[in-house]
Amino acid sequence: MTDTGVLQPLKTWSHLAGRRRKPSEYEIVSTNLLYNTRPDAPPYEVDPGVFMNRWYIEHRDGSGLQHADWNSFRDPDELVYRTYTMLQDGQETYVFGLFDQFDEREHDEALDPAWVEQLAVLYTPARYLFHALQMASAYLQQMSPASTITNCCAFQAADSMRWMSHTAYRTKELQLTYPDAGFGTGEREIWEQHPAWQGFRELIERALTTWDWTEAFVALNLVVKPAVEEAVLRQLGNAARHQGDMLLGMLTDAQLVDADRHRRWAGVLVKMVSEDPANVAQLASWLDVWVPRADAAIAAFCAALPDSPDAAATATAATRDVRRTLGV
Amino acid sequence: MATLGRLDWYDIARATNWTPSYVTEDELYPPELSGADGLRMEAWESYDEPYKQTYSEYVKVQREKDAGAYSVKAALERSNMYANADAGWISVMKAHYGAIARGEYSASTAEARMARFGKAPGMRNMATLGMMDEIRHGQIQLFFPHELCGKDRQFDWAHKAFDTNEWGIIAARHIFDDMFTTRGAAETALMLTFAFETGFTNMQFLGLAADAAEVGDWTFSSLISSIQTDESRHAQIGAPLVTVLIENGRKAEAQQIVDVGIWRAWRLFSVLTGPIMDYYTPLEHRKQSFKEFMQEWIVTQFERSLLDIGLERPWYWDEFMAQIDTQHHGQHLGVWFWRPTVWWNPAAGVSPDERDWLEEKYPGWNASWGKCWDVITDNLLEGRIELTYPETLPVICNMCQLPINTTPGPAWQVRDYAHTHEGRTYHFCSDPCRWCFQVEPARYAGHLSLIDRFLAGMIQPMDLSGGLAYMGLAPGEIGDDAHAYAWVEKVRAARERLAS
């Protein structure tokens, strides 16, 4: 402000102007974008008592983990929309290149018939699970109280749609080679009833109906996703390689690159909330509830993997490592 | 190139509904969040999104679009477009970015609602991409104006506006939050993607991009065109949903939601788009009047899509058609008169040539709106600028949150459409705004308009300075005439010519 009290132009947004360095593109386009967290106002500009206002006040503002300044969260990867699409277009080019190369070599025709049967049970039904991760991430997107968090959740939802799409694509390829093996037709029943999947189905149905936003984050990013990624991506990928299915192994490795990115932002958020001992205690009590469910899901799924006696133990241990790395 | 075509496997990627058993369907999809009164999952099986795109196609196409829009911006960075642009056009940019950028970002929340709580898998997938689109629109429409912050403090409002209680932003939030962020997934799809995007913004963005190209602002033009291509995809989420609702005996509910949505969208257009097209855009660059644009692009096309999907014209269609001719003139006059309360500099747009154009496009303009501008113009000519500033507050509609006004002149018949609900009297600008309230009073009853807040003593001191402070506006940001009243001298010259 000048002596005459007239505001002067600034080099950046006024909310970033107090700092000493030039803001990055990430900061310019990602910070403080939500307007439903304005102090002393209901989340949305309609009747304060309308269902959705009550929902946000209860499940977001009254959430189990609290922080005085959620807007201070920063994505360690500093992804913005345009860098996300650049990054993932490159990743998709790689994956679809794999699909084409393996198709040219008639990869599916050469698979062991016993493994083909396993794929119909243990692999292609995973599209339901990946889609459920997409839905769960979309819930976090709409409920988290800072746009920097919201964006990470949106990219995570899109990545989950990516995994689901790969699975659908491979389902169709396998169906064309093995029209009578249940590909593209039997997955729903297997997802709803086969013992290998019931642990994961229970886990994700419960996570999808967890409305408190920080509990939903803890359940999804610290428990459910690590379990899915270590069992349904990594251990299934390992089993596939042992069965000569190099394509699936390389595909799950490519998907795990996304998972590593999700773990990075989740780690920063955990670090942020862990500044408050009350949050640490709450988080631990949620893990006590969620981890046994995830362990059971991993055990049921890995028990069905062929020639993989150590899969469950390895996957379970890996989820512990993930959480340790994330600071819990 | 992938061996399989998109349609070979697309259906598998949208066969992802399952029957939950550890929780119930209503727990997985709470009716308040999923909408459509809890219509069962089986009924959604026939939902078929007309615009189909896969994740892989999405990231490829969107990367290319961004490369295009950002490279146009980079290439023109050193052009002196900004320095040479008409002040009216600069105001268009300021008004647009402030009212739209973070509103679009908020629409990502609405898309996420559909991505999580929509009961049709195809809808959830398209809404996942729509959620990404809206993040793009928020981010790109912040990145572009950011470089102008250093030139003019009002550009700070591209980011700041939605944090404030500026009256236009209260109106924008009220409309956006009513339509996009506080309803179940099905209603959100009908209001956001069908009524608002299919009906209005999809076409409006085409018009705005054309106007920008016409004034030589290629950066803005390519930006807006690029956004429009996203909208034309995700705007198609809503229409197939109408089909599902009609098949399941819910036509009346769908019609009501769409009717509320169209009306609310129209009111926003009357204050934002109307003045921009008919007053701010330099005269030599105007292709169509707002009324012509509305009739050709919005009314005709949208009427057809409404009837095509099995709905009827809204009951207030005649009132809508009448307002297209009149409402934005009053909104413009109000915005200019209360110019210290906006974050851009309204262009009066009433020099002699411009008035001739207005009279040609809106016969009778001089005898009605022109009379009000005559008084303002005379005061400015005679150096009584203080009389051209407001001393009182307008009456604001409790639905659209915009000043209540009708056409001045001999036929002037302003009236308050009042309604009393649980002991409180509400004031509305029109029958349709009052009807929106009456069909769902609990959604709006507890909201206070800016004037209600003033009368409740929430804004202190109770004068313009208190009002500006409440709205977050300070000198350096507050609006003034875009052309620093240069147009008044054109009037003086014309009058002198006439007198000599």
Image (cartoon, coloured by chain):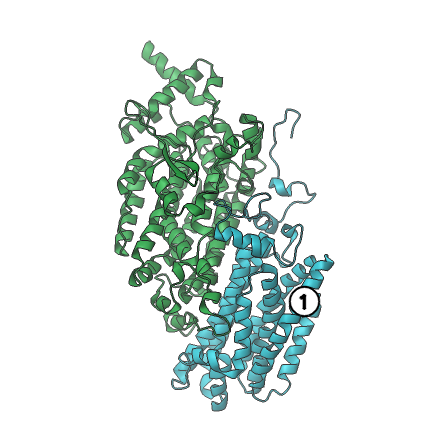
x then y, percent, for residue B62: 47, 58
- The quadrant of the picture occupied by the C terminus of chain B is top left
Please name the residue shown 56% across and 79% down the image.
A249
**Which chain is drawn using green?**
B
Please name the residue shown 33% across and 38% down the image.
B431
Extreme-top residue of the structure: B500
Q: Which residue is mark 1?
A: A285
User: Does residue B238 appear in this view?
Assistant: yes
Of residues B362 and B41, the one drawn nearer to the viewer in this rendering = B41
Of residues B144 and B161, the one drawn nearer to the viewer in this rendering = B161
Q: Is residue B358 above or below residue A313?
A: above
- How many labels, in total? 1
- The quadrant of the picture occupied by the N terminus of chain B is bottom left
Q: Secondary structure at mark 1?
A: helix
User: Does residue A274 appear in this view?
Assistant: no
Extreme-front residue of the structure: B423
The local crowd at label 1, few if under 14, some if 14 to 19, many if 20 or more residues have their Cα within 10 Å, is: few
- Colour of chain A, in one word, is cyan
Residue type (three-letter) at the residue carrying disc 1: Ser
x then y, percent, for residue A231: 59, 78
x then y, percent, for residue A124: 47, 78
Q: Given the image, what chain letter belongs to the residue carrying mark 1?
A: A
Please name the residue shown 55% across and 87% down the image.
A243
Give the left or right position of residue A297, taking residue A117 as reference: right
x then y, percent, for residue B195: 36, 50
